[in-house]
Amino acid sequence: GPADNTRFIDMPATFAKVIGTARSWIYQSEPEPSVGGRSLRIPQGRTLGGGSSINAMLYIRGQPEDYDGWRDLGCPGWGWDDVLPVYKRLERNERLAGERHGIDGPLPVSDPRYRHPLSLAYVRAAQQAGYRFNDDF
């Protein structure tokens, strides 16, 4: 197809402008009991790069239990202990290193340079409500 030369894909802050256009699909989840029975929108990229092209440059791994679940369902090589070394080889993490993160890979991973005061207040409120802070996010 034609090139997707649009600033809305090129600029992470404008990722939401792509959702609902010809460059995305909008799937709906089944009703989810954990959110009051609502059906959730699940936008997916309809362009080269798929969802990675419309995710505001967020980098998030799945939970170890997700990978172990795939392994347990008959996908050998997809358990957490199998994929973690691959993640470590891929990552060039600016802040975290050690047994769970790599620092020499081709994929730069960094924290935002700016955090909005409301974002910081949200995290503080969650901690005050008893949620444990996770520095590895």
Image: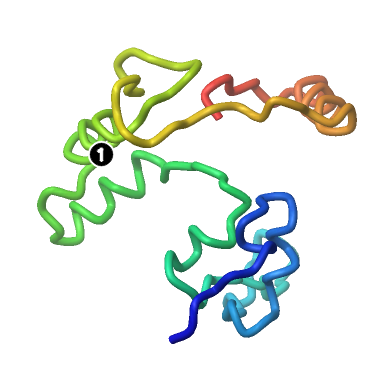
**Residue 116 in the image, given as x and y percentages of width and height:** 84, 31
Q: Is residue 36 above or below residue 113?
A: below
In-image side of 85 versus 98 (left or right)? left
Q: Dot 1, how many residues are within 10 Å of its Cα: few (below 14), some (14-19), or many (20+)?
A: some
Please tell me in which quadrant of the rendered image residue 39 appears. bottom right
Name which residue type carries label 1.
Trp
For the C terminus, which image quadrant?
top right
Q: Quadrant of residue 106?
A: top left
Relative to 124, residue 73 above or below: below
Q: Residue at x 74, y 57 (%)?
A: 14
Residue corresponding to mark 1: 80
User: 100 or 14: nearer the eye?
Assistant: 14
Image location (x, y in percent) of residue 2: 48, 84
Residue 27: tell me if it is visible.
no
Provide the secondary structure element on which disc 1 rests.
helix
- Write the residue at 29% across / 48% down: 67
Tell me which residue sits at (20%, 60%) in the image: 73
Image: 25 above or below 53? below
**Residue 30, position as x, y percentages in the image:** 58, 78
Which residue is most to the left? 76
108 horizontally vs 4: left or right: left
Residue placed most toward the observer, 104 or 73: 104
- Relative to 117, is 99 on the left or the right? left
Q: Residue at x 59, y 77 (%)?
A: 24
The relative height of residue 66 versus residue 9 in the rendered view (above or below) is above
